Image (cartoon, rainbow, N blue to C red):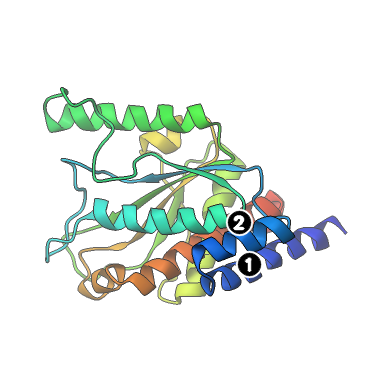
């Protein structure tokens, strides 16, 4: 019975997503807040758009910057999560890092920035956090979004796998699986469940062009949202 109820909540969240996409933002807020119990009500979620400011992150051949796309997709994801009832916080809302203005040198700024992101996440005490990044490699053949997690808790693996499953199902352009990532500071040191989502490769021209398109950005954000719904409605053991 409990499993049936959880499946029902997840299905409601998916139906909610379809409905919200077709409504203006202000209208959809009124409809759902007044008439329905939202699937993510009472849950705090932190989104961490990678890089920012002097650290643009990965760069495409055409000059497309990782930090710009990561922020755009994070804001779209924030909208979906908020409309489903979550309290959502971004580590950055604009093209800037979290280091103090007087911190000199890129390496020092990056070290301070990542520490402050971790502090931000831990201070919010979220249900979960997601760090949104993009990839770039010397080879242009690699493509596809992929989720990563630190293997310190089953919740991390469950979150990454649920998101990856929805990316595979909705985007239909990758067979990558969620993988362990031991070397990312935030995943290792944050005190709450989290995952890193690398949403694509700027070094692959075809995927880079997709990542710059509003419709694809919306689809990516919606896929991550559906993965979050599965995480909060399915027991950890159910994903095995």
Q: Is residue 100 above or below residue 157?
A: above
Q: What residue sits 45% from the left and 74% below the top?
A: 171
Residue 173, above or below 126 = below
Residue extending furthest toward the top = 102
Q: Nearer the viewer, residue 135 or 208?
A: 208
| Disc assigned to residue 16 | 1
How many numbered marks does the figure carry?
Answer: 2
Residue 24: give x, y in percent of width and height.
50, 68
Q: Are discs 2 and 1 less than 8 Å apart at CB?
A: yes
- Which image quadrant is residue 97 in? top left
In this figure, which residue is indicated by the disc labeled 2?
A: 84
Give the percent coordinates (x, y) of residue 156: 55, 44
**Any part of residue 161 in sight:** no
**Farthest residue toward the right?**
1
Under circle 1, the secondary element is helix
- Within 10 Å of disc 2 (Cα), the crowding (few <14, some 14-19, many 20+) is many
Q: Residue at x 45, y 62 (%)?
A: 221
Looking at the image, residue 14 lies above or below residue 84: below
Residue 194: percent from left, percent from top: 50, 42
How far apart marks 2 and 1 lie (CA) works out to 8 Å
For the C terminus, the quadrant is: bottom right
- Relative placement, left or right, of 99 versus 30 is left
């Amino acid at each position: 019975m409990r499993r049936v109820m959880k499946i029902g909540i997840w299905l409601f969240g998916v139906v909610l997503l379809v409905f919200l996409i077709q409504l203006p933002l202000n209208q959809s807020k009124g409809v759902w807040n007044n008439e329905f119990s939202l699937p993510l009500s009472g849950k705090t979620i932190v989104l961490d758009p990678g890089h920012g400011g002097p650290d643009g992150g990965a760069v495409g051949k055409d000059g497309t910057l990782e930090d710009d796309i990561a922020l755009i997709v994070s804001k779209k994801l924030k909208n979906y999560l908020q409309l489903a009832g979550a309290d959502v916080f971004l580590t950055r809302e604009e093209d800037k890092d979290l280091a103090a203005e007087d911190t000199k040198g890129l390496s020092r700024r990056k070290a301070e920035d990542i520490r402050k992101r971790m502090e931000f996440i831990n201070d919010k005490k979220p249900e979960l956090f997601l760090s949104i990044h993009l990839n770039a490699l010397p080879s242009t053949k690699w493509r596809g979004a992929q989720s990563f997690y630190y293997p310190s808790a089953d919740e991390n693996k469950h979150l990454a796998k649920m998101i990856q499953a929805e990316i595979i199902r909705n985007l239909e352009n990758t067979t990558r699986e969620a993988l362990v990532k031991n070397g990312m500071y935030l995943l290792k040191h944050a005190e709450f469940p989290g995952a890193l989502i690398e949403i694509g490769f700027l070094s692959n021209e075809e995927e880079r062009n997709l990542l710059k398109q509003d419709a694809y950005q919306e689809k990516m954000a919606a896929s991550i949202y559906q993965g979050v719904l599965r995480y909060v409605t399915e027991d950890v053991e159910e994903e095995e």
